[in-house]
Amino acid sequence: MLKLKMKKCVYCKQEIKDDRAVDVCDKCGVGVWGERMFKAIIENMGNAREKGDLFQGLVNEDLQKSLQEKNFNSIKIK
Ligand SMILES: [Zn+2]
């Protein structure tokens, strides 16, 4: 069966079970950004859906860039 909503970590391809705004698992997120930064990213990305945040732009831009590169590669190979 296909689960269309299942997300996978862009780094390790592990399934992500919660409904977070970034496709990165806890392990990789902490490994890449550090625990505090990763938490802030998750929170900011989540909040950003509803309200415009001052901090969000900074984190978002940087994060999106790296995510897009990783995503792009894995999608193209398929
Ligand atoms: Zn991962």
Image (spheres, helix red, strand yellow):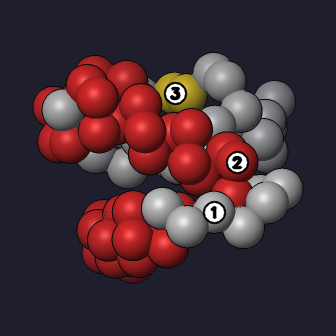
Q: CA distance from mark 2 to mark 1?
A: 8 Å
Residue type of the residue flagged with mark 2: Asn
Residue type of the residue flagged with mark 3: Glu
Check disc 2 and report the residue beneath it.
47
Contact between marks 3 and 2 (CB within 8 A): the answer is no
The residue positioned 39% from the left and 71% from the top of the image is 58
Is residue 77 shown left or right of residue 4?
left
Q: Which numbered circle lies on residue 75? A: none
Query: Where in the figure is residue 41, as x and y percent of width and height?
Result: 44, 45
Which element carries disc 1, helix, strand or loop? loop
Q: Quadrant of the C terminus?
A: bottom left
The residue positioned 56% from the left and 48% from the top of the image is 44
Check disc 3 and report the residue beneath it.
15
Contact between marks 2 and 1 (CB within 8 A): the answer is yes
* Residues packed near mark 2 inside 10 Å, few (<14), some (14 to 19) or many (20 plus): some
Closer to the chain start, of discs 2 and 1, is 2
Check disc 1 and report the residue beneath it.
53
Is residue 28 shown left or right of residue 9?
left
Q: CA distance from mark 3 to mark 2?
A: 22 Å
The residue positioned 49% from the left and 73% from the top of the image is 57
Q: CA distance from mark 1 to mark 3?
A: 28 Å
